Amino acid sequence: MKILIMGIGNVLFGDEGIGAHMANLLQEKYRFTSEEHEVDVIDGGTLAQRLIPIITDGYERVVLIDCVNVDDSNIGDVYCFDFDKVPDYITWSGSAHEVEMLQTLQMTELMGDLPPVKIVGVVPYVIGEDTTFMMTDEVVAAALTMERTIIDYIESFGIKAEIKNDLQLRDVSEHTYIKGFDACY
């Protein structure tokens, strides 16, 4: 089985970059091994519809890391749900950084090419027009829960998640924008 872990987010808007930061953390921290399964980790940034060819490239499962909007929630609350069974209390729309991600998944589903998608999301502090690379303490703390949720899901398929570098989110978040830039060249 091929599994894709994809982080979505705009690192220029603080907490909104959590998906991209988490993808980079998982890439740098873990080695995923299995004799029968393959795990790819990708920072999808804000590419939305341009991610369709990646999502449909033979993956049998997708884990999408993003922000979520939830009524009566607190910054840093973590939610995990299947894309085809979004709970009523979640108004997930790809968050403020990329409203097209929801439409991207819906279009891919309409084409019949969408594998099962597990969404691991966190409620961000949404900033206005100013940009910042800094994330709130609440979302940084929530990253531990998100990481454990993702690793537990991956391990449920018999895949070993071995720590190759003992890193935390802030260790990689300062360099996420550089990795994204390097990937363009």
Image (spheres, helix red, strand yellow):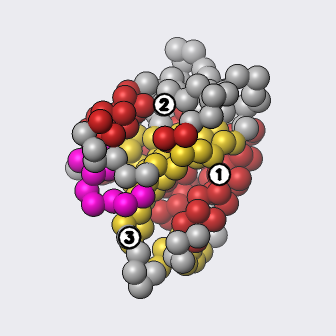
- Residue 41, image x, y percentages: 42, 59
Snapshot quadrant of residue 98: top left
The residue indicated by pointer 2 is 94
Q: Pointer 3: residues within 10 angstroms few (<14), some, or many (20+)?
A: few
Residue 141 in view in this figure: yes
Residue at disc 2, secondary structure: loop
Tell me if 70 is positioned left or right of 100 in this view. right
Q: Quadrant of residue 50?
A: top left
Q: Which residue is mark 3?
A: 1
**In the orientation shown, which residue stands out farthest toward the bottom?**
35
Quadrant holding the N terminus: bottom left
Q: Residues within 10 Å of mark 2 (few under 14, many from 20)?
A: many
Residue hosting label 1: 146
Rendered position, 100 above or below 8: above
- Amino acid bearing label 1: Met
Name the kind of residue labelled 3 in the image: Met
Q: Position of residue 80 (x, y in %)?
A: 63, 46
For the point 43% across and 24% down, the residue is 99
Foreground: disc 3 or disc 2:
3
Kindly check if marks 1 and 2 are in contact, taking CB atoms under 8 A apart as contact.
Answer: no
The magenta segment is 51-61
Tell me which residue sits at (52%, 14%) in the image.
129
Query: From the viewer's perspective, is the residue at label 3 or at label 1 nearer?
Result: 3
Q: Earlier in the sequence, mark 3 or mark 2?
A: 3
Residue type, mark 2 in image = Gly
Where is residue 122? Give x, y as percent: 64, 38
